[in-house]
């Protein structure tokens, strides 16, 4: 079934660490070798062995219209012929920035970068410079890229100054990083009571998309906004996943919260490598060349990514019903999975918000990282393998979300539910 993929993987391991360019692609947590993809179209993805799958990874979220959407790709040939990078400004950068500013009331100005990691890293630097403070506060289970100050792991306490998660990150780099429990305002209040005068910002995924899908409980985001306002700290929403996906105005529109800085990801490049961070003018004016906070990038705002992003965001702007369709399909999948769980009487739990969904192998509820850590990852591995056999590609990790696209048809959802029924019976040895 995966003969060509296996051959490519063996070759890849000779030249690329672990044979992959991002760890989750190694499929280690599901005890498989990775499959290598040849192409994607609509809701489907095709590997080098000719197998096709209904895809729920979708480049981890940005392909909201599905693979190779013709309207998103429009104009790419023209860009390729005219030049892909110049190192000096182009008009499409301005058009894209204007579109983002018009879409997010909390953003007056925006700076393009090349990845979500760059966006969050730059946003933290800006927050520290603006507030003239050193400490930052993040949450267990929220991933904000692999910059050094965010690569920390939590201890057993509600608030912990942490040791580096990764070798190569010196202790002193993370000494000013505070980690609290997601969806736990009490832990945040405690941190600010002790260190509030030196906390530059809170950075949070408004919907945690890197420990499965974990929405905020009622009052959590509002509480963060209140605490940061009281202490003159900044609130940073990492909307790399939720921006333009949860709704056109992202999580901040959905929950009615205006953060001070917003980080965007690859959806604003139509799936190409890109990121951005933006906020109010009095904050963003501190960035060079207006201010002294340095940040630069040769490929920032490159024409290819800006063109595809502009096409995609414009289509979303003009067709808001897309979001209703995404949620309608996600609800159908959620209901189908819940029916199976009830019928089989198994300890599984579905979390969903809008077009993002996750099936947890545990009783639930799942509202924070401690809950998620209790999942049965071995059962998820069995389930994942069976779903691949059934032609369904899920994230190769229990701790990642599934993404519904506009290209997923009702038939795709029905096929997925039928496959999940077989896979769950297999996982729990139910005849």
Image: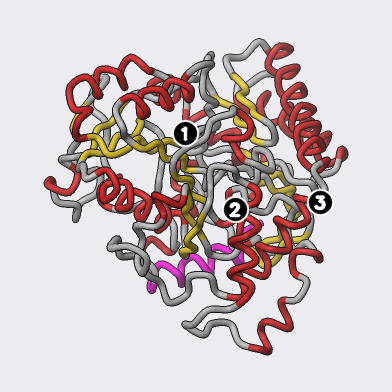
Q: Pointer 3: what residue?
A: 318
Mark 1 or 2: the one toward you: 2
Please give the label number shown on residue 211. 1
Please give the label number shown on residue 102. none
Q: Residues within 10 Å of mark 3 (few under 14, many from 20)?
A: few
Identify the image quadrant of residue 270.
bottom right
- Which of marks 2 and 1 precedes in the sequence? 2
Mark 3 or 1: the one toward you: 3
User: Is there any visible trace of residue 48 in the rendered image?
Assistant: no
Task: Determine the CA span between mark 1 and mark 2.
Answer: 29 Å
Q: Is residue 271 above or below residue 326?
A: below
- Which of marks 1 and 3 precedes in the sequence? 1
Q: Which residues are magenta?
A: 1-15
Q: Is residue 363 left or right of residue 177?
A: right
Q: Quadrant of the C terminus?
A: top right
Q: Foreground residue, 378 or 271?
A: 271
Task: Determine the CA span between mark 2 and mark 3.
Answer: 16 Å
Q: Is residue 323 left or right of residue 393?
A: right
Q: Looking at the image, which residue is at 80% across and 49% down?
A: 407
Task: Determine the CA span between mark 3 and mark 1.
Answer: 32 Å
Residue, far left: 172
Q: Secondary structure at mark 2?
A: helix
Q: Secondary structure at mark 1?
A: loop
């Amino acid at each position: 079934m995966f003969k060509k993929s296996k051959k490519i993987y063996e070759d890849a391991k000779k030249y690329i660490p672990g044979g992959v360019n991002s760890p989750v692609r190694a499929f280690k947590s599901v005890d498989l070798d990775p499959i290598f993809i040849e192409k994607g179209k609509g809701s489907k993805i095709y590997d080098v062995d000719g197998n096709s799958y209904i895809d729920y990874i979708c480049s981890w979220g940005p392909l909201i219209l599905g693979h190779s959407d013709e309207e998103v790709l429009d104009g790419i040939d023209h860009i390729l012929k005219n030049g892909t990078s110049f190192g000096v400004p182009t008009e499409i950068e301005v058009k894209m920035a204007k579109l983002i500013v018009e879409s997010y009331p909390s953003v007056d100005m925006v700076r393009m970068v090349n990845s979500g990691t760059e966006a969050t890293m730059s946003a933290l630097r800006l927050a520290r410079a603006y507030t003239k403070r050193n400490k930052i506060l993040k949450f267990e289970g929220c991933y904000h890229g692999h910059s050094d100050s965010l690569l920390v792991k939590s201890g057993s306490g509600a608030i912990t100054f942490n040791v580096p998660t990764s070798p190569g990150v010196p202790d002193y780099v993370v000494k000013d990083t505070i980690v609290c429990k997601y969806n736990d305002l009490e832990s945040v209040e405690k941190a600010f009571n002790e260190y509030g005068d030196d906390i530059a910002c809170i950075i949070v995924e408004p919907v945690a998309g890197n420990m499965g899908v974990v929405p905020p409980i009622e009052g959590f985001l509002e509480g963060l906004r209140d605490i940061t306002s009281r202490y003159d700290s900044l609130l940073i929403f990492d909307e790399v996943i939720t921006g333009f996906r949860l709704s056109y105005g992202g999580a901040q529109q959905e929950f009615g919260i205006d953060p001070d800085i917003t980080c965007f990801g690859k959806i604003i490049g139509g799936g190409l490598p890109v990121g951005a961070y933006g906020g109010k003018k009095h904050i963003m004016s501190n960035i060079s060349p207006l201010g002294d906070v340095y940040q630069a990038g040769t490929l920032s705002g490159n024409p290819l990514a800006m063109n595809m992003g502009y096409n995609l965001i414009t289509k979303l702007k003009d067709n808001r019903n897309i979001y209703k369709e995404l949620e309608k399909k996600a609800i159908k999948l959620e209901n189908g999975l819940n029916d199976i769980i009830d019928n089989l009487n198994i300890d599984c739990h579905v979390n969903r918000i809008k077009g993002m969904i996750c099936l947890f192998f545990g009783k639930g509820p799942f509202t924070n990282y401690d809950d998620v850590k209790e999942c049965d990852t071995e059962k998820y591995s069995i389930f994942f393998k069976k779903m691949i056999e059934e032609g369904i590609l899920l994230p190769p990790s229990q701790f990642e979300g599934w993404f519904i696209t506009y290209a997923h048809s009702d038939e795709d959802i029905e096929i997925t539910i039928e496959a999940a029924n077989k896979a769950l019976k297999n996982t729990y040895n139910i005849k």
